Image (tube, coloured by chain):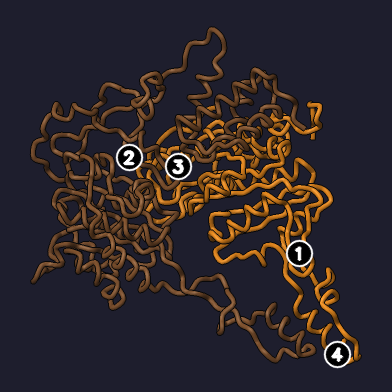
Amino acid sequence: MTASRSDGLPTPADLQADFRARGYVTGEALSTALRLVVALQKPLLLEGPAGVGKTEAAKTLAGVLGTRLIRLQCYEGLDAQAALYEWNYARQLLHLRAAEVGGARVDDDELYGERFLMARPLLQAICEDVSPVLLIDEVDRADDAFEAFLFELLAEWQITVPELGTISARTRPHVILTSNRSRELSDALRRRCLYHWVEYPSARQELEIVHARLPGVNAALARQVTDAVHALRQLPLGKPPGVAETLDWAAALLSLHRDHLDAPSIEATLGAVLKLREDQLLAAPTLRGVAAQTPGQD
Amino acid sequence: MSEPVPANLAARITAFAARLRTRHGFLIGPGEAADALRAAGAVELLDRRQLRDALRAVLTDRPEQTRSFDHEFNVFFRRDGEPPPPELPPLLSETGAPGAEQDPAATPRPPQGQEGQVPTPAPPQTGEEPELVPAPAKPQGKAADHPDDADGDLQTVQTRLSPNAGAGGAVHTAADDLNELLRAASALIRVVELGQARRLRPMARGPKLDARRTLRAAARTAGDPAALRWLGRPRRAPRFLLVLDGSRSMGKDATLLLRFAQALHLRSRRVEVYAFSTGLTRLTPHLRRTRPGQPLALPDLGEAWGGGTRIGENLLQLARQERERVNRDTVVLILSDGLDTGEVEVLERALRDLKRRAGRVVWLSPLAALPGYQPVQRAIRAALPHLDALLPAGGMDDLLRLGARLHRS
């Protein structure tokens, strides 16, 4: 990690270069937003279509900062207990029984001590000595109640365990929240976060990503694949292909030793890029057009 | 951590934040303005692009705001001698996806006092493509109220439908039957049974032992878990997606159903409402702004009201637009008479898509309330295999019975 500013924090340009070195091609706007996560110690909400690299951005940031990534995957029904901490009830019961047999008395302080506490991602994140990257992934999948709980945590950076008291953060984690907009997030949560909309990369950026992630790929094939994916994203597809699909498609073609896209190779690998039968039918004319074109020259 | 921002730039950034708040309705308070200054201090101030990216990350919270933000930034932080940025291209009249809350003042309206000059539309033909005709731009929003502020940068166009489409126009409804509609809405919400939530809650009975409460109880009996406590799954709360046919053939029924949508919205926050005629418009932001008990007044809904019918195309657009939000907790209520000359294949595809994702798909038709009604219209016949129920919606009585009928169906 390089740092050219007096505050010792990575500049956007440094971040961009470090991300690129790890195979993540990012624009300036995202690297500036990530710089602010570190400088302002505010959470960053990343929104955008599925498969544009929101989660990957958090993982890469952890790599670039040389710190631990702690991930909380949100889902319907996730509650504070599963995200924060749980007591090891089995061990507590055994301890109670053993004490009873031995004639000893067990008080609450002993029963609810740290030895029986199992830290879940959020508690882990505030107990780290070095600021970790805390990824709260797909926060839109959690329900409203969890979201409300979350913004209290993000504002105070402390957790109250009724039996233990309040645990304040040793260091503030660098928090990245991601959302696919499957549910509208509250204004209250948005106001506590920096915000960046991650768009599909440009054709040039996506080509760079393919080359960065699949160094062995033929240049003409990479261009054809990225051009074809961009053409597909213009169609009203149910599930437009993300960057992950572009990489999967290129990798599938690579494994079949293809050096350009033609009708048979498209047919053989279509499932890597379009995951709905209706989308495949809808895209057939576009893909026929792609197959008919001569491979582009670099 | 951040470097101090020069006083003159700090003042400009503060004024910039205030302008975004007052002119574009951004949620910017003192905290956000202070963060903007800190963010500016954390990037290279001489790099205009970095400054813009940093301020955008702090001051916006939705993708729809990017356009206004970038334009204002280019106006505010223009270098000396740099030509002014081009005017923003016109906004479309249709509302975007949830989250794309529009400023009510930003909805294109016919200019006051000029309505009589609009050519009278010829009788419409269903399914005709509307045609967008650019009209002279005029300042919008507050500019109209404050002549001194008339140098608005956002320009609008008047959206005129082709003579073959409907007249559109503002929608006003009375509120005298709100109580009954609220009763109908409550009954509907009460009876919808979609199954159980995944989230476990302490309950008297349930499938999983509540170890925490059981242990608490066991501590009182020397570690013997004599009194077991349970976690159960409560009923899943439904979301409603209402799609309202606002075409001319729906006439008065559409207004009643619109008020019903408002009542449902007042009873549950998990309601999305769309209206369609030749085009599709999201109404939820308008309903949210209407205070309970006040008559519902919507701005000109353009293609979504009073025009021809394009059920299939609009439902398909809706299915795609709402794809991520329609899930097994969603009850889709389509309120339409089904009189459509469009392609039934498109309608089938849209309904198949909705049915696959939604908890229930219910079609409410005013025609179904007529004695001896047979679902023989092309659209209804094509839709039937994909519906959980086709129910009448001819008046208040039908709406009051809706909950019970849905429960039986």
Element type at mark 1: strand
B241 displayed left or right of A230: left
Element type at mark 3: loop
B364 displayed left or right of B213: left
Identify the residue at horizontal 55%, vertical 29% (top origin).
B17
Q: CA distance from mark 2 to mark 4?
A: 70 Å
Discs 2 and 3 carry the same chain letter? no
Task: Identify the residue position indicated by label 4 in the image.
Answer: A100
In the rendered structure, the colour chosen for chain B is brown
Discs 3 and 1 carry the same chain letter? yes
> What's the amino acid at mark 2?
Glu
> What's the amino acid at mark 1?
Ala
CA neighbours of label 4 inside 10 A, class few (<14), some (14 to 19), many (20+): some
| Quadrant housing residue A72 | bottom right
Image disc number at residue B94: 2
Image disc number at residue A136: none
Task: Identify the residue position indicated by label 3 in the image.
Answer: A262
Foreground disc of the pair 3, 1: 1
> On what subunit does the disc labeled 3 rest?
A
Residue B56 location in percent, x, y?
57, 32
